[in-house]
Image: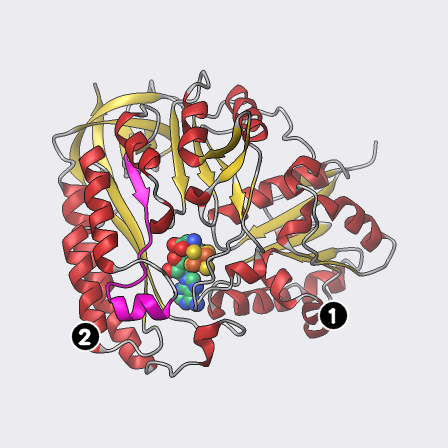
Amino acid sequence: MSEPKKLFIKTYGCQMNVYDSERMAEALGGQGYVETKSADDADMILLNTCHIREKAAEKVYSELGRFKGLKADKPDLKIGVAGCVAQAEGEEIMRRQPLVDLVVGPQSYHRLPEMEAKTRAGEKALDTDFPEEDKFEKLKNRPKAKRGPTAFLTVQEGCDKFCAFCVVPYTRGAEVSRPADRIIREAQDLVERGVREITLLGQNVNAYHGAGPNGDMTLAGLIWELNKVDGLERIRFTTSHPNDMDDALIEAHGTCEKLMPYLHLPVQSGSDKILKRMNRSHTAESYLRLIERIREARPDILMSGDFIVGFPEETDEDFQATLDLVEEVKYGYAYSFKYSTRPGTPAAERPQVDAEVADERLQRLQALITRHQRVIQDSMVGKTVSVLFEKSGRQPGQMVGKSEYLHAVHVSDADLARGDLRKVRIKSSGANSLGGDVI
Ligand code: SAM
Ligand code: SF4
């Protein structure tokens, strides 16, 4: 029997890319590939890329440059670029870096096996179409191998919102939802393979409106269906847009037992002037009222968000409004970024904020967020949380898992196994995690 070919995938960016990489590995498994953790012994290298900020896109070219030596030693090595840089730059990637054999956009992954065959025949393969067919249906089914207790599951892709800073509507295309029955089948399959927690993914996951048995189903409807799946213990979803938080979804946070008390709800800025220029179509006030309603439904919910500082024409007053909003919400986690100009987006043409000013604002915002994060994490000490254990810790006999609020929790208990879901009393709060005992 011939040796299986080896596939090395490096994933950049969002959780959706993590999910896509798993599916690409499965699709190429059908071509005789097994995954390897090292680029050095690979027969095919795939970079699954991110285009959201300039730095992320540039990393791809420096990484590709590093593969020159590998390709010189092994001329049969195939190098591919997938993901949003592939979609945005297409053929330009092969022009800029001729060692690239294959470029595939996020909507064409089901065509990877044919593309791989083409590269084996010595040709270059490029596909950045937005085909009509559902790529997830065409991708080989997930094989039945056992897997860890948590998994991502993409339910919705693309975006029609066109925020003025964002490339997603151009790289991932129009908003499309997968039919509910396919998602439920995939969730059941994951559970049979050992998964106990599923995170539903979408660029605007709460805009989900996939076909269901009685017309379109909302995200809340889908969550309630998944709540019935035996063996599935926890449901999460990300990322949500404030304008798509409907009443049923807010209510589900208070009533659906498997839906975890954690919500990632990006606001981007606390200034109405900036929000308007970002084309966000919500105000700081409407966002705050929304959080009030969500907290009424689920008082202990841990809020998370995204912020952009230094958006074109952001003044000190605008930035102060962002700090004020953060002070009011008190996020348990939040991700903040310096505005990055993305060619082809409306904001790229506007007067830019001085880089040093933006850097200083980013530091101030991150310091405030970290302070709140720390207070919230420390407030867990003395409480009992439920923990789904995912992997061994650094110390012998130690296991690490996530609480319902997504805090990492360490427990030293030799009887614990991966996939166990236990009540844990929190005793300590460290730099980035909690410690406790199983009760
Ligand atoms: N759909 C989600 C939403 O509207 O909140 C966000 C998806 S986007 C992949 C993730 C985050 O990247 C955004 O929330 C935003 O904070 C950040 N981001 C997007 N474009 C950016 C840019 N040009 N510069 C800096 N950060 C950006
Ligand atoms: Fe990008 Fe999110 Fe805005 Fe869509 S809603 S354009 S994904 S930031």
Give, as a three-letter code, the residue at label 1.
Pro
Residue at x 51%, y 47% (from the top left corner): 16
Rendered image quadrant of residue 173: bottom right
Which residue occupies the extreme front position in the image?
215
Can residue 431 be seen from the camera position used here? Answer: no
Q: Give the position of the N terminus as an image quadrant.
A: top right
Within the image, what quadrant is residue 124 found in?
bottom right
Estimate how packed mark 2 is, as few (under 14), some (14 to 19) or many (20 or more) residues with alpha carbons within 10 Å.
Answer: few
The residue carrying mark 1 is 98
Which span is picked out in magenta? 260-278
Q: Nearer the viewer, residue 57 or 176?
A: 176
Amino acid marked by disc 2? Glu
Label placed on residue 309? none
Identify the disc placed on residue 317: 2
State which mark lies toward you, 1 or 2.
2
Judging depth in this view, the residue of 401 and 27 nearest the camera is: 27
Discs 1, 2 touching: Cβ within 8 Å = no
Q: Earlier in the sequence, mark 1 or mark 2?
A: 1
In the rendered image, residue 111, in percent from the top left (x then y), is placed at: 74, 47
Q: How is the image coloured?
A: secondary structure
Q: Is residue 98 magenta?
A: no
Tell me the residue at 60%/25% (across/down): 145
Q: In the structure shown, which secondary structural element does the residue marked by tag 1 occupy?
A: loop
- Asked whether residue 264 is drawn in magenta, I would say yes
Q: Residue at x 32, y 49 (%)?
A: 265
Q: Is residue 235 above or below residue 166?
A: above
Q: In the image, residue 436 lies at what x, y percent?
A: 21, 29
Q: Residue at x 66, y 37 (%)?
A: 26
